[in-house]
């Protein structure tokens, strides 16, 4: 049976709830709960007051699954009370710091310990991760989680050991991540109640071309998946590399990119009877006779729903549990002035006009009164582009049809950047948010927290990077 408690002054006060969802996503840091508190105006069910900053604890059948801080509240006219709480890793997302080169030569566990100490984040004893990171240059404001994720990636490259950071029982833990020898089995007709299987070659590459260096003699490398090319045709991935790499190093990178992008991409969404230990990054063995396969998948996102004594879960499964690609910042590339894609002409006017609204707008779903101070994401982009005579139309569903899709590496200021899955009701793959690129990796958009400039890749913003979909050029 589900139980939610308010932890205050050493006491635990039970909070009556109608339903609770508990969710998380790989490499997106914090897990969270969304709780609908049962409230009766007659006074017979008057729950304890829960406010921002309070600690709540969630138990299922007597076992603690979550402990975190209330960060959002919603109270409707009808008396509905909803709260959202995040575990300790949310502080790694909300806080940024510039550490310079002070982490050079430090182990991952030493970096994590320093960060926890600097930001008063309670943590367990971290294991010695052994590898001394040669370079972890952080000379621009970077989220604490992205700093640690870069450290985990570099440690994995050097030692082949994969680490994960997570929150449990009110403390941050850093431990080695292994594939369990005994995996849960999910089988349709038994514990799986529904599924959707998707295959796509929209992001597949059968040929990769990388170019490094400037001037008259750039280094160029091309590698090809001959088997895939014969079956799917030529699908080229092209990228201009900022680093000056020699032929061998560039070819090594190209082969790595090809390995990641070859073949159709497969995802499996399932609805199943709840298993509380099955969360993001877990390995699971799936049997679906209708699809004629039995194979191992990894949990990318998980949403567990608890209503009364019933526990169900929705999982998005993927074939590989790899670290996300992250651009390593260097002194030469950390400054925004060194990036390509500077705005000119109409694009410059669009970006300047968009920036004039930073901190001045209130989010209102479906709103279009930007001049009056409120609106939603697509209302904002439509208003801004009308400044240069371009009508994007209403809603993200219309705007995503405008212009042409371009690769992320070719993004320029003034392009549109689209995100998917930010509105749960629309589905995980539905386009649901849009912003205006200000420089590669960053955009301006109007969201729940107002009009802000933020990153849109996993290396510039862990949250938005997880929902990034694609770039479109309309100017």
Image (spheres, rainbow, N blue to C red):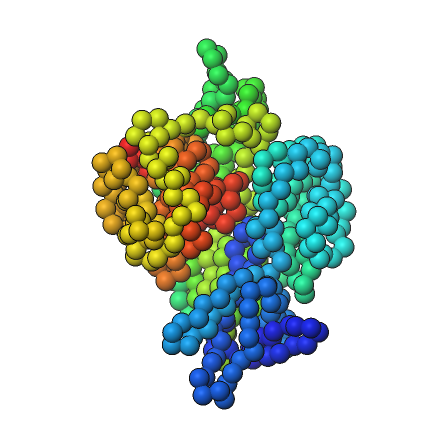
- Quarter in which the C terminus is drawn: top left
Left or right, 24 with respect to 265, comes to right
Q: Residue at x 35, y 37 (%)?
A: 353
Q: Residue at x 64, y 44 (%)?
A: 148
Q: Is residue 420 visible?
A: no
Q: Residue at x 44, y 84 (%)?
A: 41
Return the x and y of residue 99 as percentages of the image width and height.
Answer: 66, 38
- Quarter in which the N terminus is drawn: bottom right
Return the x and y of residue 309 as percentages of the image width and height.
Answer: 51, 80
The number of callouts visible is 0
* Nearest to the observer: residue 360 or residue 381: 360
Left or right, 144 with respect to 112, comes to left
Left or right, 93 with respect to 195, comes to right
Q: Is residue 325 visible?
A: yes
The quarter of the picture where residue 252 lies is: top right
Residue 474's place in the image compared with 55, above or below, is above
Residue 441's place in the image compared with 396, above or below, is above
Return the x and y of residue 104 as percentages of the image width and height.
Answer: 71, 34
Return the x and y of residue 169 as percentages of the image width and height.
Answer: 68, 65
* Nearest to the observer: residue 455 or residue 282: 455
* Nearest to the observer: residue 446 or residue 125: 446
């Amino acid at each position: 049976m589900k139980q939610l408690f308010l932890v205050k002054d050493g006491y635990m006060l039970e909070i009556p709830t109608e339903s609770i969802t508990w969710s998380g996503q790989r490499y997106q840091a914090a897990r969270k709960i969304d709780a609908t508190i049962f409230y009766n105006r007659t006074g017979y069910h008057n729950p304890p007051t829960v406010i921002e900053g309070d600690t709540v604890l969630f138990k299922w059948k007597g076992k603690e699954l979550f402990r975190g801080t209330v960060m959002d509240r919603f109270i409707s006219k009808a008396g509905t009370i909803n709260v959202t709480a995040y575990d300790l890793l949310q502080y790694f997302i909300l806080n940024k710091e510039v550490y310079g080169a002070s982490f050079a030569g430090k182990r991952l566990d030493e970096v994590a310990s320093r960060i926890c100490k600097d930001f008063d984040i309670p943590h367990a004893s971290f294991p010695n991760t052994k590898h001394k990171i040669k370079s972890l240059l952080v000379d621009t404001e970077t989220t604490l989680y992205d700093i640690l994720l870069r450290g985990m990636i570099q440690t994995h490259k050097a030692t082949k050991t994969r680490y994960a950071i997570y929150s449990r029982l009110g403390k941050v833990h850093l431990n080695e991540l292994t594939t369990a020898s005994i995996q849960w089995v999910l089988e349709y007709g038994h514990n799986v109640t529904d599924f959707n299987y998707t295959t796509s070659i929209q992001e597949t590459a059968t040929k990769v071309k990388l170019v490094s260096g400037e001037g008259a003699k750039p280094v160029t490398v091309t590698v090809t998946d001959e088997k895939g090319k014969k079956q799917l045709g030529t699908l080229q991935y092209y990228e201009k590399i900022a680093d000056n790499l020699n032929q061998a190093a560039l070819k090594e990178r190209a082969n790595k990119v090809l390995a990641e992008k070859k073949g159709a991409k497969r995802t499996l969404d399932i609805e199943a009877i709840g298993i509380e230990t099955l969360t993001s990054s877990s390995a699971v063995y799936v049997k679906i006779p209708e699809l004629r396969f039995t194979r191992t998948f990894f949990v990318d996102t998980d949403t567990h729903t608890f209503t009364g004594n019933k526990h169900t879960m929705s999982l998005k499964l993927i074939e590989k549990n790899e670290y996300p690609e992250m651009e390593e910042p260097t002194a030469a590339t950390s400054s925004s002035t060194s990036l390509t894609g500077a705005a000119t002409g109409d694009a410059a006017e669009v970006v300047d006009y968009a920036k004039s609204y930073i901190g001045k707008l209130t989010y209102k779903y479906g709103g279009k009164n930007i001049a009056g101070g409120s609106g939603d994401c697509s209302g904002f982009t439509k208003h801004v582009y009308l400044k240069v005579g371009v009508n994007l139309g209403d809603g993200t569903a219309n705007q995503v049809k405008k212009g042409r899709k371009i690769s992320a590496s070719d993004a320029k200021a003034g392009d549109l950047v689209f995100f998917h899955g930010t509105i749960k009701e629309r589905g995980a793959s539905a386009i649901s948010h849009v912003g205006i690129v200000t420089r590669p990796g960053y955009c301006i958009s109007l969201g729940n927290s107002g009009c802000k400039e933020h990153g849109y890749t996993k290396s510039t913003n862990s949250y938005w990077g997880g929902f990034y979909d694609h770039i479109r050029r309309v100017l």
